[in-house]
Image (cartoon, rainbow, N blue to C red):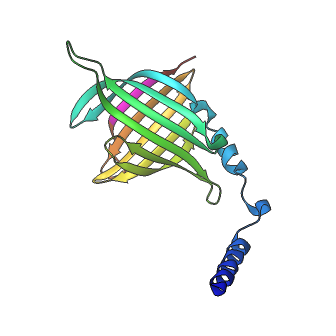
Amino acid sequence: MHHHLVAGTAIAATLLAATPSHAQMPDGSVSRAAIAKLDFMVGTWRGDAWMVRDGERVQTAMTETVEPKLGGVVLEVEGLGIVPAAEGGEPRVVHHALGVISFDAQTGDYALRSYIASGQSGDFALTPVEGGVRWSRSVPGGQIRNTALFANGEWHEVGEFSRDGATWTQIMEMRLRREP
């Protein structure tokens, strides 16, 4: 029994020695400063969008909610697209996504990890552009890129698809206004 106690203590001491002291732990300030540069996205945004779903253009009422989380180290972005009820029917959710925008202090890159209600998820490279942000990723058969521009309390986003990286086809657009 005594042998196990000594071995356990030695393991604990080794683990503690391998743990960086508090002074060496990153404090998140680099990530916070980078995420603060995207403050223009924060808020609740509502408006209209259209998107191509199964080869068909679908008109939706969109809401995007963007909030800083973890003390400003990440931004959480939740999007909800609803097709208004047809006569006598129920409204239909056609888009429900949750994204987390982060900043990697080691590489200096922003990233967007996105989840949709169907269970799919993906990682997008996110780049600040003049007046907004752009994110893109490879998908089966090509590439998708979204560009969101922010001006005068409006969020204008265009989504595009390309098979070859040269010719782009628009697959969605939304125009939202920030709620007061």
| Residue 11 visible in rendering | yes
Q: Is residue 83 left or right of residue 56?
A: right
Quadrant of res 10: bottom right
Q: Is residue 100 above or below residue 25?
A: above
Q: Nearer the viewer, residue 25 or 4?
A: 4
Looking at the rendered image, the quarter that the N terminus falls into is bottom right
Quadrant of res 38: top right
Farthest residue in the top direction? Answer: 87
Q: Is residue 137 left or right of residue 33?
A: left
Farthest residue in the right direction? Answer: 23
The magenta region covers 171-176
Q: Position of residue 154 (x, y in %)?
A: 52, 23
Farthest residue in the bottom direction? Answer: 3
Residue at the image position 69 percent from the left and 51 percent from the top: 28
Q: What secondary structure is the stretch in magenta mostly built from?
A: strand
Residue at the image position 57 percent from the left and 32 percent from the top: 41
Q: Nearer the viewer, residue 64 or 69?
A: 69
Q: Is residue 180 above or below residue 98?
A: above
Q: Position of residue 4 (x, y in %)?
A: 62, 83
Residue at the image position 40 percent from the left and 45 percent from the top: 115
Q: Nearer the viewer, residue 114 or 155?
A: 114
Q: Position of residue 173 (x, y in %)?
A: 38, 30
Magenta stretch holds residue 92: no
Farthest residue in the front direction? Answer: 1
| Residue 131 visible in rendering | no
Looking at the rendered image, the quarter that the C terminus falls into is top right
Q: Is residue 55 left or right of residue 37?
A: left
Magenta stretch holds residue 173: yes
